[in-house]
Image (cartoon, rainbow, N blue to C red):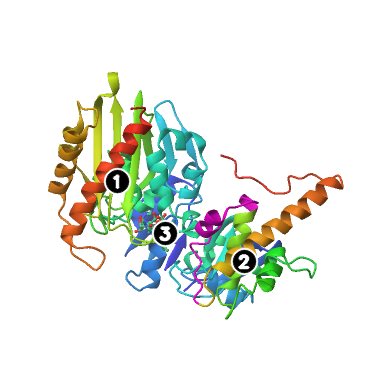
Amino acid sequence: MRYEAPTSTKDAVTLLSRAKGSAFVLAGGSDLLVRMKGGFIEPDLVVDIKRIPALQEIRKTSTGFRIGAAVPCAAMGEHAGLRKAWPGVVEAANLIGSDQIQSRCTVAGNLCNASPAADSVPALVAAKAKAVIAGPKGRRTVPVEKVPAGPGRTTLGKGEFVEAILLPLPKGKTGDAYLRFTPRTEMDIAVCSAGVCLKLGRGGVIEEARVALGAVAPTVVLVPAAAKAIVGTKLDEAALAALTAACEAACAPIDDKRGTVEFRTEVAGVLARRAAKIAYQRAGG
Amino acid sequence: MAGVHVSTTINGDPVEFVCQPAEVLLDVLRNRVGLTGAKEGCGTGDCGACSVTLDGRLVCACLVLGAEADGRAITTVEGLASGGRLHPLQEKFIEHAALQCGVCTPGFLVAAKALLDRNPDPTVEQIRYALAGNLCRCTGYDKIVRAVQAAAAELATDAAQAGKSGKSKKTRKQTAA
Ligand SMILES: Cc1cc2nc3c(=O)[nH]c(=O)nc-3n(C[C@H](O)[C@H](O)[C@H](O)COP(=O)(O)OP(=O)(O)OC[C@H]3O[C@@H](n4cnc5c(N)ncnc54)[C@H](O)[C@@H]3O)c2cc1C
């Protein structure tokens, strides 16, 4: 194995695109090194992106926040502006692992690891986050939900990697929230999860909504029917019931030791409902 | 396989080593640098027995490559005591019998130090969350939590005394938010 720590995106792209054999990006390593040590992968090249200065910071821009792909999730929790604008995203990112993992793990790594149970991803999807992808043909920006293709697989091409995650500035009365179900309070993988983002119009009526579910399908899923169920309402009981039903209908989970199909489906609906209430309150409803 | 040459700082001292590209920092510390305080428990970031700090942040040394340490600053449990005097956390762990077999202890000490550096007066709940990445299979956690509380109290007393004798009270950095 070769280890490289380029100091520019261009050099990282060159290394990744010219690599013969298997090449992996190293961000926090909290998935990659576990898989390497377990013998699941044997990289010929590891490209550590943490020495690229532009990737190390959270930057507020005129259109929102740019979270560099090397920023550890702990730093997201320390960023007051980001916390205020996107509390749900920050809470989701801060749920990943322990303090030790928080010092290392990144949201871009969480996304590119492509686990359906990745905690930050439903919150990012709900918040309409985008991924800036650098590659041999230049840069492209895609909605985050377009990055994972299935468990452990992404849509990234050879030589491509995620440089940053973009979050918009929340418009008007916007609120977001993320909830997961785990048997333990800490250090556990989500059995299922839900991220919700709402924008309120006049009189507390929901104008826009995005609902995303984790660990109930091969990838995190955006559920437009769940959003539709609550748009135009003030999140009354009927709307919440319709939201729950739409979420349940979108679930196609696996049955495993952590949760049965029935359990995951029911709990996903419950979490979405509770997350919607929190998001509604945060939006000022 | 070509080795990677690394220049780093460990517990304040400059250290150079050559390691394999896939070798983790924990193995470098234990096998090449001779610092055997950090322990391998699980090797997958779950147990925290290998906790060290890297540029001030708490990490599991089993999930960091040795090569990543180039130009960075590492502290290990060996760096806690100063001038032959144990750190208050170490003293309180002994006083409160917050250990049995001791394998998890270095990790708990380093993690607890990272907590107190950030938050000198943590609640029990904050202590438990901050130590959630450290597993102990002998004592249970109550004695450990009590030892951390006692150390925090002692450090606060020390700081207050230092304040009275004219030194700045702000010896501990609060994480800027
Ligand atoms: C003890 C422990 C507890 C954990 N708990 C949780 C949890 O509660 N919730 C959760 O969701 N996850 C958890 N994880 C998994 C892991 O910490 C997260 O998925 C984390 O966000 C991964 O980020 P990373 O920066 O460490 O990724 P890495 O390990 O560096 O990379 C992960 C994968 O993505 C690729 N990659 C990384 N960055 C990029 C990029 N910028 N562009 C393209 N590809 C990239 C890598 O090549 C690799 O395949 C846990 C892991 C451990 C060890």
What residue sits 20% from the left and 35% below the top? A237
* Residue labelled with disc 1: A122
Amino acid type at image mark 1: Pro
**Does dot 1 land on a helix, a strand or a loop?**
helix
The response on whether ligand 1 sits within 8 Å of label 1 is no
The C terminus of chain A - image quarter: top left
Comparing A233 with B18, the one in front is: A233
Query: Can you tell which of label 2 and label 1 is closer to the viewer?
Result: 2
Query: Can you tell which of label 1 and label 3 is closer to the viewer?
Result: 3
Amino acid type at image mark 2: Leu
Q: Residue B109 carries which label?
A: 2
Count of marks, rendered view: 3
Give above or below for A49 relative to A224.
Answer: below
Q: Residue B93: x, y in percent?
A: 65, 70
Q: Earlier in the sequence, mark 1 or mark 3?
A: 1
Q: Residue A255: x, y in percent?
A: 18, 64
Residue B146 in magenta stretch: no
Subunit of label 1: A
Q: Are marks 2 and 3 in contact (CB under 8 Å)?
A: no
Subunit of label 3: A
Range covered by the magenta-colored residues: B117-137
* Residue labelled with disc 3: A186
Residue B10, image quadrant: bottom right
Residue A204, image quadrant: top left
What residue sits 49% from the left and 47% below the top? A52
